[in-house]
Amino acid sequence: MEEPWDFEFLSRIADGCLSFLSEFVEDWLANDLRVSIFKILLTWLIFSLLAIHFAWKVYGNTVNDMYYRQGSGQNGGTPDTTAGLGSW
């Protein structure tokens, strides 16, 4: 039978998260080359994700319409034979 989670277990998890966050804040505020590179890469990642999001808002319907299969059925029309495969 499984033991219920006790307060000590949750307290250790909370202490671990708090110590990680405090070390992260100390490193973030330090003038270190490693931290500067991390900040640059984090900024680039956020900028890229925002650019992809706005590009998809503008061009998403156009891209989706380009790949929409016309025809009947759930996946659109399908060819009668498979291209490149002969009958066995």
Image (spheres, rainbow, N blue to C red):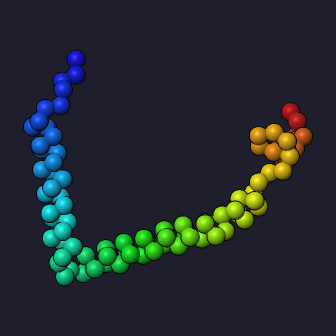
Residue 60 at x, y percent in the picture: 66, 64
Of 87 and 68, nearer the camera is 68
Number of numbered discs on residues: 0
Q: Is residue 4 above or below residue 70?
A: above
Residue 71 at x, y percent in the picture: 86, 46
Q: Residue at the left extreme?
A: 8
Of 79 and 68, nearer the camera is 68
**Residue at 14% from the left image edge and 63% from the top image edge:** 22
- In the figure, is residue 2 to the left or right of 84? left
The quarter of the picture where the C terminus appears is top right
**Residue at 18% from the left image edge and 53% from the top image edge:** 17
- In the figure, is residue 33 to the left or right of 76? left
Residue 21 at x, y percent in the picture: 19, 61
Q: Residue at the top extreme?
A: 1
Quadrant hosting residue 78: top right
**Residue at 17% from the left image edge and 45% from the top image edge:** 13
